[in-house]
Amino acid sequence: MIEQVKRSTFSGNIILKNSDVILALLFMVIIGLMIIPITTWMLDIFLTFSISFSIIILLISVYILRPLDFSIFPTILLVATIFRLSLEVAATRLILLYGYTGPDAAGTVIKSFGKFAVGGDFAVGIVIFIIFIVINFLVITKGATRVAEVSARAFLPDSIFFLVAVLETK
């Protein structure tokens, strides 16, 4: 399939040959989003792109026939996550700097999602925020515990082997 893209389009050929340069430029944009203040309409465009990109990733991962057809999935997830984190930093900066001006301080996408999720009521928003904090804490704690258990089981035979080897040499 990649060979067909290379042969069929000139732009596909350029993208495939310079994918490392494109990835470097993408990371520069991501870092720039965290450092350089952006306007609300730019944040709206980036958030819309992020949501659309997430839907595309979801649809691709659902409709592929073999996992190797989408082998770049972990890299895409990493880049998308870092991009979303930079958008969160940019949105937080806008809210903290211009939040006193009203609900439009962080752009229309965030305002619309806030109205959709909590109906414009701050009390409901605080309760939902607390629920999210508790859920995230529980998930992270359980995940870290599970990782520690698996690591302990995985490395236990190795440590026993080395302990036996040390005892045999004495």
Image (cartoon, rainbow, N blue to C red):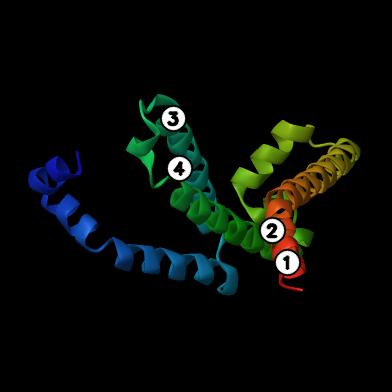
The earlier-in-sequence mark between 3 and 1 is 3
- Marks 3 and 4, how far apart in space? 10 Å
Q: Quadrant of residue 124?
A: top right
Looking at the image, is mark 2 or mark 1 earlier in the sequence?
Answer: 2
- Count residues near mark 2 (Cα–Cα under 10 Å), then give few for <14, some for 14-19, many for 20+: few
Circle 2 is placed at which residue position?
161
* In-front residue for pair 24/74: 74
Q: Is residue 96 left or right of residue 131?
A: left
How far separated are the C-alphas under marks 2 and 4? 48 Å
Give the residue number, with chain letter if any, for mark 4. Answer: 53
On screen, residue 93 above or below 13: below
Residue type at numbered disc 3? Leu
Crowd band around label 4 with a 10 angstrom C-alpha radius: few (<14), some (14–19), many (20+): some
**Which amino acid does the dot numbered 4 rest on?**
Phe
The residue sitting at 67% across, 51% down in the picture is: 104
Would you call the spot at circle 3 few (<14 residues within 10 Å), some (14-19), or many (20 or more)? few
Q: Position of residue 155 (x, y in %)?
A: 70, 55
Q: Is residue 82 visible?
A: yes
Residue 154 horizontal side relative to residue 9, left or right: right
The mark nearer the N terminus, 3 or 2, is: 3
Name the kind of residue labelled 2 in the image: Phe
Image position, residue 30 (x, y; %): 50, 65
* Residue corresponding to mark 3: 59
Badge 3 element:
helix
User: In this figure, which residue is indicated by the disc labeled 1?
Assistant: 168
Q: Are marks 3 and 4 in contact (CB under 8 Å)?
A: no
Query: Image quadrant of residue 170?
Result: bottom right
Residue at x 59% of width, y 61% of height: 86
User: What is the spatial separation of the Cα atoms under label 3 and label 1, in whole angstroms?
Assistant: 57 Å
